Structure formats: C-alpha cells, structure tokens
Image: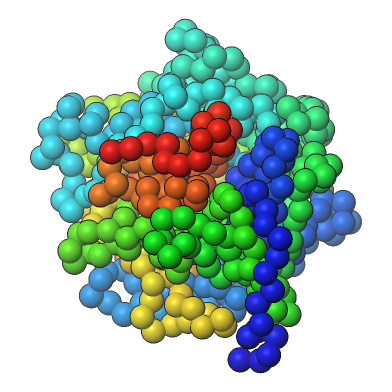
C-alpha cells in the first residue's frame, strides 16, 4: 500500500452524510439542506448533467451507452459473484447482462425506462393476506414471505409526492374510492389524479387494448415518467414533452422529457448553499462507535486513492440496492444472514423480478417500433398480485400484462421469427421484413422471498481495495416458474386475438442466468419490517441496530411485487424523510422500540 493510502485525512463534521446521489440521495439531500443542515453526498461515479453529458447530438449513441455500457458501474471497480444454489461455487460477473446498475450522479434513475407504479395494497401485507385467504399451506415451500411493516394507506401521500415530483403521465383508476373509467380499477385509492395526461399509444397498444377487453380484462395506459406534456414540478424544475425517440433505457434523456434526478431534483439541489457533492469518491465503510450502536461517519477514497474520514451526525445509505447491502455487511451494521442457521437479517430475502410472455409476428402490420418511449404501453392488472383467485393454481403472486414498444434501435432491436439463421443473407432479409411486423405481450411478475435466495460476502473474491465482493445466491423457484408459465399462456392467447399469425411463448425454463438482460429490479437484502429478527430496518427504514443510519431503496423490499420498483422506492424515501424531519431530528434515536 502506497503512502497516500496509509494517511487518512479527517474532515470537518457534517450534519448529514449521504452515500450515493441518485433518486433517493438527491431527494433527501435537497429536503434536509432546506432544513438548514450541512449535507454532503459522496458519489462513486462522475458528475452527469443533461446539457453536457446527454446533449441532443450525442445522447442517442447506442454503441456508447447500450453496447459499451458507459453509464454503468465498471465491473473492474465493483461487481459481485453469483451462484444459483448454496451448494455451488459463486463466480464473478465480469460483464453486466441480467441487470444494469448505474454509476455516477443520477445512478440508475438516470438510465431507466420510466415505468412508475404504486404497489397494490395487498402487496404490503402479503403474508397476512395470503394466509388469511388461502391458508399457510398454500404458500410456497421454503418461503420467507413477510409483511412490510407499513401499509399502502400510510404510503399513499408519499406516492403522491413522488409522482408530482416526477410529473408522472397517467390516468387514475381509483380516485378516493371511486373507480374511474380508462384507469386501473385494481389500484389502491389515490387522493388525486396523475399530474399529467397519459402518453399517446401506438397501433400495437390499440390492438392489445381491444383484445384484452375481449378476454374480459381491464386495460389502461401504464404510468410513465416519460412526460406527455410540459410540466414544472414541486421543486420548480421544468420538464418537456416526450418526443418518442426510443432512447430511454440505458440512456440519459437529451430532451429533458424523462423524469430523473437530473431533470427533477439536481437543478434545485445545486442552489442550496449547505449542500456539497463529492464525485468519484468511493465510500469504503460506515464508521461505528466502540459499542457498534452509533455511526460516527464514513471513510472514503478519492479517484487518486487518497483516504478521507468524513464525520457526520446522520448517515443515509442511498446507493444501489445491492451496494447498500454490501456496505452494511462491510461496516458491521446489523447481523449478517446465515442461511444454514436461518438467523440474521443483512442479506436476507433477496428477490428479483420474473418475466414471461409472448412474441407476436404479424402478416402485414406496421407498428413503427422506433416511435417509442421507455414507459409507452397499455397494461392489464387483472392477473397481478392477488387480484384473481389463486385457488388450485399451485402458485401465489402475479404479473402486470403489457403491450409496449420501448425502442426500435438499430443495433439491438432485430426481432426475427423462430428458425431464422443467426447471420447471413437470410438473416438480413428476415430483419428487414420483420422489423415493423412484430410486437410483444409481456408479463412482469412478482418474485417471493426464500431461505435459499440471499446475499452475503464472498469468501474468495475481492475488489481492488481488498474488500470481499458481494455474493448473490439466487434462482427462480417452482412458484415463480408456474406463475410465469401461466401468465405466458394468457399472453399468447391475447396475442392471437390481436391477429398475430405466429406466436412464441416465452417463459422460465432454465436456471436464472446473469448473461441475458432481464430487469434492473434487484430487491431485498436490507429489508424493512416490524420484527428485528426478520428485518434489518424498522418501518421508517432506520437500522434497528444503528439508529443514526437509514437505508433507502429497493434493498428494503421484503419480496418483489409484479411491478417495477421505482415508484415505491420514491414513496418510501418521502415516508422515511417525513419521519426524519418530524421526529428524528427533534429527538435523535430509535423511532420504533420492540
């Protein structure tokens, strides 16, 4: 170790130290700076700004941002090891595939698609609800499904806050208990509608909506952070309407039309005199007092490897879900999960998201997939959560079924019918002929939590700083495989009703793999709850063990629902923020006692 790494510079104390400057970190930084607190956010990646990093001339660079993954964490900097079962030896992920953790200011909230959901009311009390309706024996073998410790009604105003921060485009389905035409009749009651109208849908979505109704379903335009119209949000930040360019996922938005920390929070945050951002600085641990019950600050290294200690009164972990868990394990915050003993909480209840459905090929349709956005689509929620009777099906959980075109980009969007050669003249003809004649009907499904699906520190592999990598043990279980197949069959039926000449059923048939992209919806590992024996955090996302540490993000989910997580991450952020501002700051200490 060189001399620069041996010396640690101790910096002046801050009121709040935030690890990571994505959605959760930027919201908390702005709100707490406005409380008059000195706030520093420490971000591992570089500064990213719309005008300089994603200007209109360079933002739509598929090779740079999609194929070469410029905005993602470099595996040489931090990766994790993966295995399907505890009996296997985990190996390092050397290229991101199944999921895409972001790097730099904005985090994954900069390169996301923009689907912004509220979880169903039953999702938050899922164990209690399923047990009461079907009996405990109906839950899958080896499960660790548990209630969240917070209810939908408690979170509703905070969902609203996040939606009005982002200007979400959609149509209400349940307005103060009254079901609204054209919206989602299964959603929890909301106090007011979405801030902007839904996006304009394409031809495929019109066909899907008609077919779904013929199947007795209730289609609606899915809520979108790709805005349908100009909007000025609650922080005074202005967004523009979406141009349907199809460069959302993996890309920053050059048009200021996709809600992100860059468009919704940072312009206001950077005006706060008590806020400071330190980029290209990696937090290596949260420092604890001698008794381990109080965080004294964090240690981090800058891009030159120089080490600093940043003392702080309040430490907020706002990194990506997986990295929050790793930092807790490295810092000794909470008892690590031990699968063999089924004890401990940090690393427990890791979950992912299931995906199945149908690819539909048409004879002469013209879907124009290039005219798209990340959350353009029509969804039916009739088979999501427990919106339908699971009796006799052999599984619990469900999925939102959607017809969507997120892009028609020239490198990666090359759909061809089964049996097409993978290269050569025949492949070229097929890509040209099929490009506008194919669409999908997909099911984004829930994943329950299980004893054998968890996160811990790898005993073999280390990062460049000599710290153990995070190890992921995960595979889809029989419950999710049955559910995915059942959903895919319904998707095929809908696609046929739409008029497809050929359909392909897509479901889970192999062990989960890190290679093909699926979703960047990693959840759990530092879950919230009402029992310290089964949760790392209390209902306010405060560590049970270290009361001046709060942990944000999807790492708090006890299991994953049939929706993308960002809307719920935003709601939980405002929920925890409210508890910090109204209670914790007045009397620092545990907000829940057991």
Q: Is residue 31 among what the camera can see? A: yes
Tally the marks.
0
Q: Measured along the vertical axis of the image, is residue 350 above or below residue 88?
A: above
**Where is residue 154 shown, x and y percent of the image?**
44, 24
Kindly indicate the quadrant of the structure image that contains residue 272. top right
Horizontal and vertical percent for residue 184? Answer: 48, 21
Q: Nearer the viewer, residue 85 or 265?
A: 265
Looking at the image, which is closer to me, 376 or 14?
Answer: 14
Which color mode does the image show?
rainbow
In this picture, is 455 found above or below 80? above
Q: Position of residue 261 (x, y in %)?
A: 71, 45
Residue at the farthest top position = 178
Q: Depth check: 178 or 322 in front?
A: 322
State left or right for residue 491 relative to residue 397.
right
Q: Quadrant of the C terminus?
A: top left
The image quarter in which residue 12 lies: bottom right
Residue sitting at x 38%, y 76%: 458
Q: Who's the residue at 52% across and 72% down the image?
A: 79
Q: Residue at x 76, y 48 (%)?
A: 275
Q: Residue at x 45, y 10 (%)?
A: 177
Q: Nearer the viewer, residue 30 or 364?
A: 30
Would you identify the image quadrant in which residue 394 lies?
Answer: top left
- Residue 5: x %, y % from top left: 65, 84
Q: Is residue 59 above or below residue 499?
A: below
- Image quarter (top left, top right, bottom left or bottom right) of the N terminus: bottom right
Is residue 199 in view from this perspective?
Answer: no
Give the side of residue 499 with respect to residue 31, left or right: left
């Amino acid at each position: 170790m060189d001399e620069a790494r041996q010396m640690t510079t101790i910096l002046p104390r801050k009121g709040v130290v935030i690890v990571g400057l994505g959605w959760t970190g930027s919201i908390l930084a702005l709100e707490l700076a406005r409380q008059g607190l000195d706030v520093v956010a420490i971000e591992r990646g570089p500064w990213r700004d719309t005008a300089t990093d994603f200007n209109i001339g360079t933002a739509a660079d598929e090779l740079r941002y999609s194929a070469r993954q410029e905005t993602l964490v470099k595996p040489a900097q931090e990766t994790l090891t993966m295995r399907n079962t505890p009996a296997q030896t985990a190996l390092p992920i050397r290229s991101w595939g199944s999921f895409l953790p972001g790097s730099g200011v904005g985090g994954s909230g900069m390169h996301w698609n923009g689907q912004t959901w509220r979880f169903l009311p039953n999702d938050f009390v899922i164990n209690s609800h399923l047990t009461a309706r079907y009996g405990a024996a109906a839950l899958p073998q080896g499960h660790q499904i548990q209630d969240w410790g917070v209810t939908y009604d408690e979170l509703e105003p905070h969902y609203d806050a996040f939606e009005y921060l982002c200007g979400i485009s959609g149509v209400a389905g349940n307005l103060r208990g009254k079901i609204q035409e054209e919206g989602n009749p299964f959603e929890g009651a909301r106090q007011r509608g979405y801030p902007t109208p839904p996006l304009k849908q394409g031809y495929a979505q019109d066909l899907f909506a008609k077919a779904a109704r013929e199947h007795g379903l209730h289609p609606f335009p899915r809520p979108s952070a790709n805005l349908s119209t100009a909007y000025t949000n609650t922080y005074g930040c202005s967004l523009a309407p979406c141009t349907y360019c199809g460069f959302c996922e993996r890309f920053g938005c050059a048009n200021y039309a996709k809600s992100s920390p860059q468009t919704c929070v940072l312009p206001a945050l950077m005006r706060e005199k008590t806020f400071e951002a330190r980029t290209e600085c990696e937090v290596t641990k949260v420092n604890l007092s001698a008794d381990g019950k109080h965080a004294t600050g964090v240690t981090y290294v800058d891009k030159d490897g120089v080490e600093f200690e940043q003392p702080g009164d309040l430490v907020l972990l706002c990194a990506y879900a997986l990295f929050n868990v790793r930092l807790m394990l490295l810092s000794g915050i909470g008892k690590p999960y031990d699968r063999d003993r089924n004890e401990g909480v940090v690393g427990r209840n890791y979950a992912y998201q299931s995906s199945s459905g149908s690819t539909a090929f048409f004879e002469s349709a013209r879907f124009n997939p290039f005219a798209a956005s990340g959350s353009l689509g029509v969804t039916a929620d009739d088979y999501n959560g427990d919106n339908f009777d699971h009796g006799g099906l052999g599984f619990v959980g469900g999925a939102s079924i959607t017809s969507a075109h997120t892009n028609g980009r020239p490198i990666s969007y090359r759909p061809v019918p089964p049996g097409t050669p993978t290269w050569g003249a025949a492949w070229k003809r097929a890509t040209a002929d099929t490009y506008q004649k194919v669409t999908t009907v997909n099911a984004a499904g829930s994943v329950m939590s299980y004893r054998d699906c968890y996160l811990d520190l790898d005993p073999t592999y280390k990062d460049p700083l000599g710290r153990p990598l995070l190890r992921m043990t995960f595979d889809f279980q029989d419950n999710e495989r049955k559910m995915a197949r059942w959903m895919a069959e319904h998707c095929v039926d809908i696609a046929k009703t739409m008029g497809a000449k050929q359909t392909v059923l897509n479901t889970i048939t192999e062990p989960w793999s890190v290679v093909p992209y699926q979703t960047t919806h990693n959840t759990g590992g530092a879950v919230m709850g009402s029992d310290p024996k089964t949760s790392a955090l209390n209902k306010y996302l405060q560590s049970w063990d270290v009361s001046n540490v709060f942990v944000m993000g999807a790492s708090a989910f006890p299991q994953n629902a049939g929706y993308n997580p960002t809307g719920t991450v935003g709601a939980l952020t405002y929920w925890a923020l409210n508890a910090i501002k109204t209670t914790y700051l007045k009397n620092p200490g545990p907000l829940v006692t057991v």
